[in-house]
Image: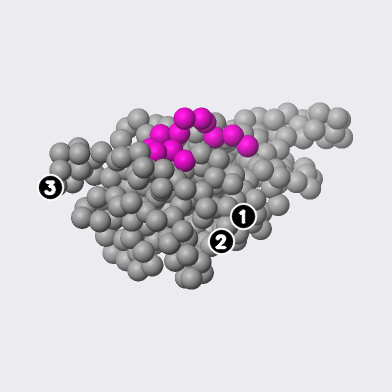
Amino acid sequence: MRQSIKALRSFAVGAGLLLSAAMPAHAGLTNNVPSCYAANRIAPPQVPYDQLIYVLIDQTVQLDATLQKSVLDNVQSMLKPGTKFVIAEFSAFSQGHYLNVLHTGVIERPIPAADEGNVVMSRLRDFHTCMQQQLAYGQRLALATTAQVLKSGTSSLDQSDILMALKSVSPAVAQEKATHKLVFVVTDGLENSSVTSFYARNAVRRVNVDVELKKAQDNNLFGDFGSARVYVLGAGVMQPASNGSTAERNGYRDPKTLMDLKQFWSGYFSRSNAQLVEFGAPALLEPLSW
């Protein structure tokens, strides 16, 4: 229907205006992408999507332009028909920052070719056009939201409750019926909370993996991601220290420290019913994939 196409176009044009203002806290709790099935009065498929990408961005991380582009490129590569996306941000519940789902959207699966003959031709034509508009709008919405969070990253926040944020979002991931689930966590991986801190003297400290996993267990911080695949980008990223050794002032991270950090997060996700596929320290060496 012509109205459905116009509606999607107006939503797409308005996305920039929406994202230039402060996004309301409830924005991400419902599907923010209009349905082409509903707009064209076509019965939707029983399974409108079979893939989920959950993007969780740490507000305390400042990525350089290359890493920001990598985040956006990887997110865009996953936004295909039959995909649900969730864009969320977190730091710690302080200084006006908290875990917040910003936008959720479903890019619907198309009508199977074998079933198109059951749809009125004029309605089918409008549906195809609508689906093209929906894909463009969904991608634009997800990427604009992600870019805005990345741009607002700051090192001025003192705490980063990574473990609590992951536990909090895990039930939503586990409850999804999507066949393929992927969690893309953009974070330095450096917990700094009342439970534990991976910092020492303005630098990353060596992490005792067994000790830190025990702390997570004692504080009930393991989650359940329903066998999701997990990618981390940005691990170990810190602003260079203002004092200390030359290596610290240059932002150097020694390989052993990063390996310990990777082992901790691999153990954390394994105990949270998830598979850590790649740990970008800081960049991913392989793109996201289902």
The amino acid type found where label 3 is placed reads Asn
Is 154 positioned to the left or the right of 210 in the image?
left
Q: Are marks 3 and 2 in contact (CB under 8 Å)?
A: no
Residue 288 lies, with reference to residue 92, above or below; the image says: above
The amino acid type found where label 1 is placed reads Asn
CA distance for labels 3 and 2? 37 Å
Q: Is residue 234 or residue 116 the one in the foreground?
A: 234
Q: Secondary structure at mark 2?
A: loop
CA distance for labels 1 and 2? 7 Å
Residue 13 in view: no
CA distance for labels 3 and 1? 40 Å
Q: Which mark, by number, is residue 243?
A: 3
Mark 1 — residue? 273
Residue 242 lies, with reference to residue 132, above or below; the image says: below
Quadrant location of residue 79? top right
Q: Which mark, by number, is residue 223?
A: 2
Residue 43 in view: yes
Q: Dot 3: within a 10 Å radius of its alpha carbon, few (fewer than 14), some, or many (20 or more) residues?
A: few
Most extreme residue toward the left is: 243
Q: Quadrant of the N terminus?
A: top right
Quadrant location of residue 174? bottom right
Of the numbered discs 3 and 1, the one sitting upstream in the chain is 3
Residue interval drawn in magenta: 279-290
Q: Dot 2: within a 10 Å radius of its alpha carbon, few (fewer than 14), some, or many (20 or more) residues?
A: many
Q: Which colouring convention does the figure follow?
A: one colour
Q: Main secondary structure of the magenta part?
A: loop
Q: Quadrant of the C terminus?
A: top right
Q: Residue at x 33, y 60 (%)?
A: 197
Q: Secondary structure at mark 1?
A: loop
The amino acid type found where label 2 is placed reads Gly
Please check the rendered image and state whether residue 63 is part of the magenta-colored stretch, yes or no: no
Q: Position of residue 226 (x, y in %)?
A: 65, 54
